[in-house]
Amino acid sequence: MSPPQRHDGEEEASQRRTAALLGLIVVLLLAIAGIVLVRELGKKARLEDCLMSGRTNCMPIAAPLAR
C-alpha cells in the first residue's frame, strides 16, 4: 500500500509545481504589461503637458538623411 500513496504524493507535488510555475508566468506577464503601459502613459502625459503649455514643437520630427 505504501508505493501507491507515494506515487500519489509525487503526482500531487508535480501538479503543485506546475500550477506554481503557471502562476509565476502569469504574474511576470502582468508585470511586463504594467511596465509597458506605464511607459506609454508617461509618454502621452509628457506630450500632453507640452501641448497644454502652449508649445508647438512637442513631437520630434525625423529628418531624412542627407547623402
Image (spheres, grey):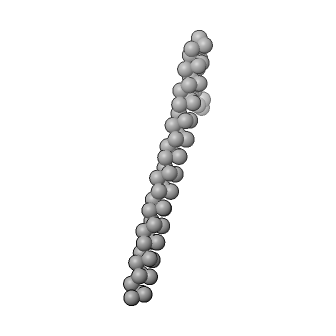
Q: In this view, does 37 lie above or below 24?
A: above
At horizontal 42% and vertical 68% (from top left) the residue drawn is 15
Residue 18 position within the rendered picture, expressed as x and y whole percent measured from the top left: 45, 65
Q: Nearer the viewer, residue 1 or 67?
A: 1
Residue at far front of view: 1
Residue 22 visible: yes
Q: Nearer the viewer, residue 6 or 19?
A: 6
Outermost top residue: 54
Q: In the shown orientation, is residue 19 left or right of residue 60? A: left
54 sits left or right of 3 in the view? right
Q: Nearer the viewer, residue 42 or 6?
A: 6
- The image position of residue 17, as x and y in percent, is 48, 67
Number of callouts: 0
Q: In this view, does 58 lie above or below 43?
A: above
Q: Is residue 26 above or below residue 45?
A: below
Residue 56 at x, y percent in the picture = 57, 14
- In this rendering, the answer to whether 57 lies above or below 33 is above
Q: Where is residue 24 in the image (x, y as percent from the top left)?
A: 50, 57
Residue 61 seen by the camera: no
Quadrant of the drawing holding the N terminus: bottom left
Give the quadrant of residue 7: bottom left
Q: Quadrant of the C terminus?
A: top right
Residue name at image x 49 percent, y 46 percent: 30
| Residue at image coords 42%, 72% | 12
